Amino acid sequence: MVKWNNNNHLCHILNVDESCIGTPTRAGFGGIIRNSTGFYLSGFSDFISNSTNILLAEISAIHHGLLLAADMGIGLLLRISCLCCPSSEYKAFLSSRNFSIQHSLREENQCANFIAKLEASSNDDFLIHSSPPKDLLALLRNNSSGTFFLRV
């Protein structure tokens, strides 16, 4: 059993994820920035047309999330669902802005997974979600209340 948590960090948390769906296949990605109690601060989503490159989508999510956090003037803990190693450019960016990276299981990263799938099935260009999409609210409530999910 797993749940979304802040791992006792008092910081802002960026959860990112990617999704490949559709015919023709395209990769979507998205992320959510929250405070340590799970309160939604901002989110974003985009897609990469005619691509099945999951790593490119994941790195794009990290890139856009870090830029959004920097624009918001916050340092954060980055939680991602895949294990990818940031390039030296990202490592320098992370260290200069008080960011750190931590792996997150997909079951505890359901909100970012939702927003990535939302964009993979949409034709919208890059979107910043200043408030959470309506269908995301129940997942955010589950995260904030500490609901456990079965690890598949």
Image (tube, grey):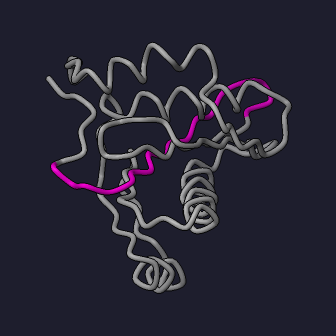
> Magenta segment, which residues?
8-25
From what the image shows, is residue 44 above or below residue 90? above
* Left or right of 53 in this view: 14: left
From what the image shows, is residue 34 above or below residue 106? below
Q: Nearer the viewer, residue 87 or 125?
A: 125
> Which quarter of the figure is the C terminus placed in?
top left
Asked if residue 16 lies in the magenta stretch, the reply is: yes
Residue 65 position, x and y percent, is: 57, 56
From what the image shows, is residue 2 above or below residue 59? above
From what the image shows, is residue 65 above or below residue 15? below
- Residue 78, quarter of picture: bottom left
Residue 92 position, x and y percent, is: 47, 86
- Residue 73, quarter of picture: bottom right
Residue 55 position, x and y percent, is: 55, 55
At a point 22% along the width and 24% down the height, the residue shown is: 146
* Left or right of 20 in this view: 10: left
At a point 51% along the width and 77% down the height, the residue shown is: 90
At a point 61% along the width and 28% down the height, the residue shown is: 117
Q: Nearer the viewer, residue 46 or 76?
A: 76
- Residue 60, quarter of picture: bottom right
